[in-house]
Image (tube, grey):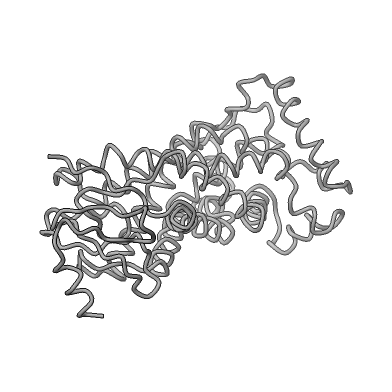
Amino acid sequence: MLPNIVHLLAQPADMPFSSQSQHQQQHFSPTEQVSSMVIGTRSLCTPLVLLPLPSLLALSPAAAPSSPQQESTFRKFLVSGTVAWIYEFSIGHFLEFTKVLKQTKQGSYLQLVQGIMREKGVVGVWDGFFPWGSIQAIAKGAVFGGAHALALGPVAPLVERGELSPLVAETMAGGIAGGFQGMVLSPTLLLKTRVMTDPIFRERMSMWETSKQSARVGFKVIQKEGLAALMKGSLTFSLKRVADWGTRFYFAVISEDYLFKKGDATYVLSNHEKLAASLIGGGLSSLLTLPLDVMVAQIQQASKAGQQVSVLATFQAEFKQGGWERVAGFATKGFVARTLHVALTTALMKTLTSVVYEKIYGCPTPQPAKS
C-alpha cells in the first residue's frame, strides 16, 4: 500500500487521477492531488491531501482539498427527500409517534404503543403518516439537504481564507438549513401532531379511512381556526430546528475530531467512523433541545386547538404543581424516543445522504480554485 501511495503522489501535476471512471477524471495542482484508492470503507470521494495545516479545509468529515467539493443543491434535494421518506416510513415515524404521545399523555412507552395498536393492530403505527407525515418526511429531507448544500457555498471560501473555522462553518450551515426546514415543516408537523393526539384516530378504521380523515384535519383547522393556525408554534419550532441542527453538526464534528482524528488534520475518516460520530452528535444534541421539543408538542397537540399556549406560562404551571423536580420531568418527556430519533436522523442527513449521493451521481465536482 505505501509504495502505491508514494508512487501516486510522485506523479506529475498534469497527470489525471481517476476516482471511479474515465468520465470523472479531474486535474489537480500539486497541492490538490488526491488518492482514488479505497482504503477500508473509506469513500471514493474522500481525498488524501498534502497541504499546509493553515490551508486545510474540513467542511466534510474528512480533510478536503483547498478548493472544496460541492454537491449539487438540486441533486442533494432529491436524494435527501427520498432517503428521508424511506427512513420515516420504516422507523422514524414510529419513534416520533411514541415521543409525541409520551410528551402529551400519561403512561409508559409499552402502554402507549399498546394504545396505538389496540384497535388497528400494527397499521395504527402509521396514523398521521399519510398524507401529512409523508409530505413532512419528503420536505424534511429535501429542504434540509438542499439548504445545507446551498449554505456551504458561501461559507467555504471563508474557511479557505482562514476567516472561519471548519467547526463554525459546519455549525452555521446546519443551523441555517435547520431554520429553513423549520419554517417549511411547521404546518405539516402541526397537522400530523393533531392526528397523533386526537382520540378519534384510536378507533378502528382502515389505513385508507385514516388517511382520508387525516387529510380532512387540515381543512378543519383552516375552517375553525383560520389559515394562520397552520403556523401555530412555528417560531418555537423554527428556533428549535436552528438549535437542533446547529448542535447536531457541532457535536458530530467534535466527536469526529476527539474520537477519531485526535488532532491529525490529514486523517481520513471511514464511513463507519462518520456514522458513529453523527450518532453521538445527534444524541448529545437531543439533551440540549429536548425542552423545546416538548413545548412544540404541547402547543400543537389536538387538545390545545384554538388556544394560545405560552411557553413561560406552561413551565410556571408545572413549577407550581411540583417545583423544579416537576419541571425537570416535564422538560425531559420522551427522552428515549427523542434521542433515538435524533441520533438516527443526524446520521441519515449528515452522512448517509452523501454516501447515497456518491453511489448515484459519483463524486461531487471540485470547485474551481480561487486566485
Q: Quadrant of residue 335?
A: bottom right
Q: x, y percentage for residue 97?
A: 67, 51
Q: Nearer the viewer, residue 302 or 248?
A: 248
Query: In the visual, does 361 lie left or right of 256?
Result: right
What residue lies at 46% left-to-right and 49% top-to-bottom?
289
Q: x, y percentage for residue 44?
A: 36, 63
Query: In the visual, does 70 lie left or right of 101?
Result: left
Q: x, y percentage for residue 143?
A: 49, 38
- Image position of 164 with respect to 112: above or below: above
Query: In the visual, does 318 lie left or right of 64?
Result: right
What residue lies at 26% left-to-right and 60% top-to-bottom?
17
- Image position of 240 with respect to 351: above or below: above
Query: In the visual, does 257 lie left or right of 214?
Result: left
In the rendered image, the quadrant that contains the N terminus is bottom left
Q: Nearer the viewer, residue 225 or 353?
A: 353
What residue lies at 78% left-to-right and 30% top-to-bottom?
216
Q: Nearer the viewer, residue 56 or 307?
A: 56
What residue lies at 43% left-to-right and 58% top-to-bottom?
351
Q: x, y percentage for residue 178?
A: 44, 41
- Image position of 365 with respect to 62: above or below: above
Q: Nearer the viewer, residue 299 or 118?
A: 118
In the rendered image, the quadrant that contains the C terminus is top left
Task: Give the total of numbered labels.
Answer: 0
